[in-house]
Image (cartoon, rainbow, N blue to C red):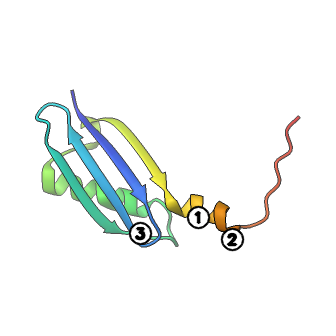
Amino acid sequence: MGCRVGVDIGGTFTDFCVFDEDSGALHTLKVLSTPERPGEEVLAGLREIERRHGVTADQISYFTHGTTVGVNTVIQRKGINLCLFAT
């Protein structure tokens, strides 16, 4: 089958949870977030998961991510001003 990967990108840390569908094993990992280079922490975490647990990108059957950074930006109204025009 494969592995399911969940990622939560926070302001300080990015958390990973990997579920191996075949063995039922659950692996977790925490890496430092890189707000100045969004997405870099995800790639670094996936490389570390491969190094530690042997899970390669082609074994990932499901990938999902969430980010408190984006949610907090909206809630706290700290982002740039945006406008959406729908026609």
Query: Which quadrant: the N terminus?
Result: top left
Residue highlighted by disc 1: 72
Image quarter of residue 64? top left
Q: Residue at x 42, y 63 (%)?
A: 40
How many neighbours does mark 1 have within 10 angstroms: few (below 14), some (14-19), or many (20 or more)?
some
Amino acid type at mark 1 = Asn
Of the two numbered discs 2 and 1 on the same chain, state the one appearing first in sequence.
Answer: 1
CA–CA distance in space, label 2 to label 3: 19 Å
39 on left or right of 7:
right
Q: Which residue is nearer to you in this view: 45 or 58? A: 45
Of the two numbered discs 1 and 3 on the same chain, state the one appearing first in sequence.
Answer: 3
CA–CA distance in space, label 2 to label 1: 8 Å
Residue highlighted by disc 2: 78
Amino acid type at mark 2 = Lys
Residue highlighted by disc 3: 33
| The label number, if any, that marks residue 82 in the structure image | none
Q: Nearer the viewer, mark 1 or mark 3?
A: 1
Residue most toward the front?
75
How many neighbours does mark 3 have within 10 angstroms: few (below 14), some (14-19), or many (20 or more)?
many
Helix, strand or loop at disc 3? loop
Image quarter of residue 58? top left
Residue 85 place in picture, x, y as percent: 86, 44
Q: Compared to 62, does 71 lie above or below?
A: below
Q: Are marks 2 and 1 in contact (CB under 8 Å)?
A: yes
Helix, strand or loop at disc 1? helix
Amino acid type at mark 3 = Ser
Q: Residue at x 41, y 69 (%)?
A: 33
